[in-house]
Image: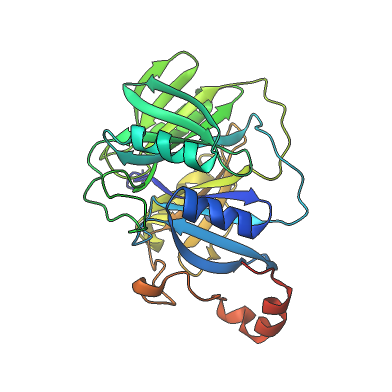
Amino acid sequence: MPSPIKGIHHITAISGPPKKNYDFYTNVLGLRFTKKTVNFDDPFTYHLYYGNYEATPGSSITFFPWQGVVQGSPNTGETTVTAYAVPKGSIEFWKGHFEKHGVYILSEESVFDDTRLLFKDSEGMKNELVESNGIVEIKPNPADGFPAKAAIRGFYGATLSLTDTGRTAELMQEFGWKKKGEESATIRFTSDPENNLGSVIDLKKEPGLKGRFGRGSIHHIAFRVPDDNAQQEWRKTLLQMGFSPTPVQNRMYFRSIYFREPGGVLFEIATDIPGFTKDEPLDSLGTELKLPPWYEQHRNEIERKLPDL
Ligand code: ZN
C-alpha cells in the first residue's frame, strides 16, 4: 500500500451570494480569507477559500457561490457536517459570540469524549466546533474579536452520512486510518498522528436522508498526500481496488484526483504542494482576484461578470 493518508486537505461546499458567505466565514467564524479565485470549470463563478493564517492543509473550507442555486438539505451519501478545531475551554466564548451574531446553535454535547457545539452557517449548513488538544501552537487568523485562546485553527474532522458504513470503513482502513470507537450509529476513524488538523472522520449510518443538493451542501471532501508521487501511488491503488479516479487536475495550489467512495461521497486526493503562496505572498493572501494562467486572457470579462464581494 502507498503511505497512509494524513488527514483532510480541504472541504468544498456550495453557497448562495458570495458577500453573505464571505461575511459569515470571516466576520462570524473569524477565518482568514486566503484565496479569491474562480471555479476552474466555470470561470464566471468565484471559488472562495478560507483558512488559518498560513492556509495550511487541513484548514481550507472553500465555496462555489452559485447565485441562483436552490436551498440544499442533507442527503445520504454526502459529507454532512464540517467540524472545526478550537482550543480547550473555548466553547463558552463561542456561545456568547454566536448569540451576538444571531447564529443558530443546534446543540452542545459530548461525543467520543469531545465537547462540541453544533451550529448552522448562513446557508443552513451544519458545522461543529470541537475543543481539541495539540492545536494551540497553530497560528490562527489574528482577527479583531477572536482571541488566540478561542480562534479556529483548522478542521477537526467531518461526518459522512451513509446508507451502510461497511465498505467506507474498509476504505478508511486502506487509507491507514484507525477505528477509534463506535457510539450509537457512528463509527469514528482517526489518522496518525491523531492531533493533526482534519484527522477525524465519523461514518454515520443515516440511510433515510432524502435531501436536495444545493446551497449549504458539501460538494466534496479532499484528503492530503504530500506530493505528486504519493498521489500517483494512490491513483494506482484506487484503480486496483476497483475505483475510478479521474486523471490529475491542476488546481494551481494543489493537484487533484477525484473518485466516488463506496457510500457515494465524492472524495478528492490533493497534494500539499505547491500551496497557497504559489501566486501571492503569505501576508497578502486573498487580497486580489487570482486566475490560473489559462484564464488571464479573459480577465476583463471575468472581472466584469463576477459580483462584488
Ligand atoms: Zn477540492
Q: Does residue 304 appear in this view?
A: yes
Q: Please say if 290 is above or below 113.
A: below
Q: Please say if 265 is above or below 10.
A: above
List x then y, in percent, for residue 129: 41, 36
Rendered image quadrant of residue 37: bottom right
- Work out which quarter of the rendered image holds the N terminus and state it: top left
List x then y, in percent, for residue 182: 40, 17
Q: Nearer the viewer, residue 83 or 307?
A: 307
Q: Judge from the rendering whether residue 212 lies leftward or rightward of residue 170; answer left or right.
A: right
Q: Please say if 15 is above or below 286.
A: above
Q: Does residue 177 appear in this view?
A: no
- Work out which quarter of the rendered image holds the C terminus and state it: bottom right
Colour mode of the rendering: rainbow
Kindly give the residue lying farthest to the top in the view shown.
184
List x then y, in percent, for residue 225: 38, 53
Q: Nearer the viewer, residue 152 or 83?
A: 152
Q: Write down which quadrant ligand 1 falls in.
A: bottom right
List x then y, in percent, for residue 78: 60, 36
Residue at x-position 50% and y-position 45%: 238
- How many numbered marks does the figure carry? 0
Q: Judge from the rendering whether residue 158 lies leftward or rightward of residue 112; answer left or right.
A: right
Q: Nearer the viewer, residue 118 or 7?
A: 118
Residue at x-position 64% and y-position 49%: 14
Q: Please say if 240 is above or below 200.
A: below
Residue at x-position 50% and y-position 16%: 185
Q: Judge from the rendering whether residue 75 lies leftward or rightward of residue 176; answer left or right.
A: right
